[in-house]
Image (spheres, rainbow, N blue to C red):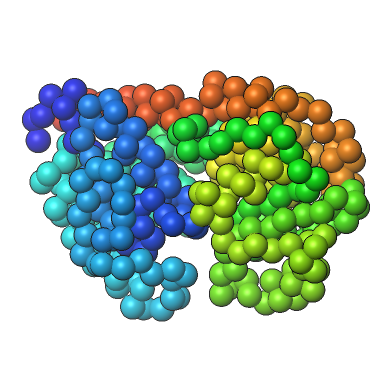
């Protein structure tokens, strides 16, 4: 297409399984919704290829009516994603100036699309995926942290930190005497360690998160026996309203990860509510949490528990830190530049390996 860059249209190829934005779980889908709507505020049109339950305030197209989460790990789910993605890539290539994709499945169809491709890496570094990226050297890759970007070697890559719409998050100055945890109920997220921190510090804990089938045994064996409905509470999956309440009212959000976190959007959400983050060091954490300014980056459960007793953060300053470093406006501007750069490189595009 030869549309003027000021009037470019972006095609977002979302997976078909979760609505955009999500009703509760779905970090990628929340990112797509906020970016597409943010671009709209800059006069840039978008089409989001998703499912019919999506409510994002831009043009939407779909093959499948309903969300499907958690995904069944079988051939039929793979076929559903492949069918949705191949259709979306084919149609978007004729309607849009840039295709913004978010999964390896979409990347594999990019060789059939004669328009620029921007691919955001939402997951952790995986050598087999990095090998796949090698076959698509002309794609413009976006890493969501410097830590993630340093692990890759694609020629056209940059880092763009996630941003959030602060208007969606309520600043709460008065805190209640409990700690919070939001995330997948999985070993790598350290839910069991959050419980240990709460017990060591003597401060109650409220847990919210999705128990996926793959980690049901972990929940039943290590988490459920600790839940008493009083000191340790599990409130299930939290939508935006529940997330605002849970995070905003808590003394601190615990983020005791056991892996190299690619970004960790919930850390930014907590700080936007005026709540500090107590996290273990891993992956992007030191990029997101400024030690002593927006929380504490710790090395052990004992240190996390000690920091609970040393909390002295001003909620308004935490929110200001988010506004300065993780605003939606900043993210939109940086993606707009990524799209323009991808278009500018298009005439010299070579065939995929």
- In the foreground, 147 or 273: 273
Indicate the quadrant containing the N terminus: top left, top right, bottom left or bottom right.
Answer: top left
Residue drawn where x is 16% and y is 41% of the image: 96
Residue 299 is at least partly visible in this image: no
Q: Is residue 228 left or right of residue 116?
A: right
Residue drawn where x is 69% and y is 71% of the image: 219
Q: Residue 179's x, y, as percent?
A: 76, 48
- In the foreground, 183 or 128: 183
Residue drawn where x is 56% and y is 56% of the image: 238
Residue drawn where x is 48% and y is 28% of the image: 327
Q: Residue 148's x, y, as percent?
A: 54, 40
Q: Is residue 114 left or right of residue 284?
A: left
Q: Residue 71's x, y, as percent?
A: 43, 71
Please tell me whether residue 192 is drawn above or below residue 166 in the rendered image. below
Residue 331 is at least partly visible in this image: yes
Q: Classify residue 52 by image quadrant.
A: bottom left
Please tell me whether residue 122 is drawn above or below residue 185 in the rendered image. above
Q: Classify residue 226 by image quadrant.
A: bottom right
């Amino acid at each position: 297409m030869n549309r003027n860059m000021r009037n470019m249209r972006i095609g977002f190829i979302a997976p078909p399984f979760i609505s955009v934005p999500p009703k509760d779980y779905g970090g990628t889908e929340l990112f797509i919704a906020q970016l597409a709507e943010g671009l709209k505020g800059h006069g840039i049109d978008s089409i989001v290829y998703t499912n019919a339950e999506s409510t994002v305030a831009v043009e939407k197209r779909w093959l499948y009516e309903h969300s499907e989460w958690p995904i069944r790990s079988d051939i039929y789910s793979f076929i559903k994603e492949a069918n949705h993605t191949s259709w979306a890539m084919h149609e978007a290539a004729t309607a849009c100036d840039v295709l913004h994709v978010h999964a390896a499945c979409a990347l594999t169809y990019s060789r059939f699309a004669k328009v620029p491709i921007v691919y955001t890496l939402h997951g952790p570094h995986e050598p087999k995926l990095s090998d796949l990226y090698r076959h698509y050297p002309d794609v413009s890759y976006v890493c969501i942290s410097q830590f993630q970007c340093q692990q890759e070697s694609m020629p056209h890559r940059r880092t763009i930190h996630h941003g959030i719409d602060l208007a969606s998050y309520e600043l709460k100055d008065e805190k209640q005497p409990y700690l919070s945890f939001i995330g997948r109920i999985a070993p790598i997220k350290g839910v069991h360690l959050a419980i240990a921190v709460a017990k060591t510090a003597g401060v109650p804990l409220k847990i919210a998160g999705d128990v996926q089938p793959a980690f049901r045994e972990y929940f039943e064996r290590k988490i459920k026996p600790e839940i008493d409905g009083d000191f340790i509470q599990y409130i299930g999956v939290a939508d935006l309203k529940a997330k605002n309440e849970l995070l905003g009212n808590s003394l601190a959000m615990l983020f005791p990860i056991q892996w190299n976190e690619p970004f960790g959007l919930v850390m930014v959400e907590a700080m936007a509510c005026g709540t500090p983050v107590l996290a273990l060091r891993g992956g992007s954490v030191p990029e997101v949490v400024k030690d002593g300014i927006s929380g504490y980056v710790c090395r052990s459960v004992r240190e996390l528990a000690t920091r609970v007793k040393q909390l002295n953060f001003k909620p308004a300053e935490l929110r200001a830190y988010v506004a300065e470093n993780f605003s939606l406006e900043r993210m939109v501007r940086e993606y707009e530049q990524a799209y323009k750069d991808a278009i500018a490189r298009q005439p010299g595009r070579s065939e995929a390996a």
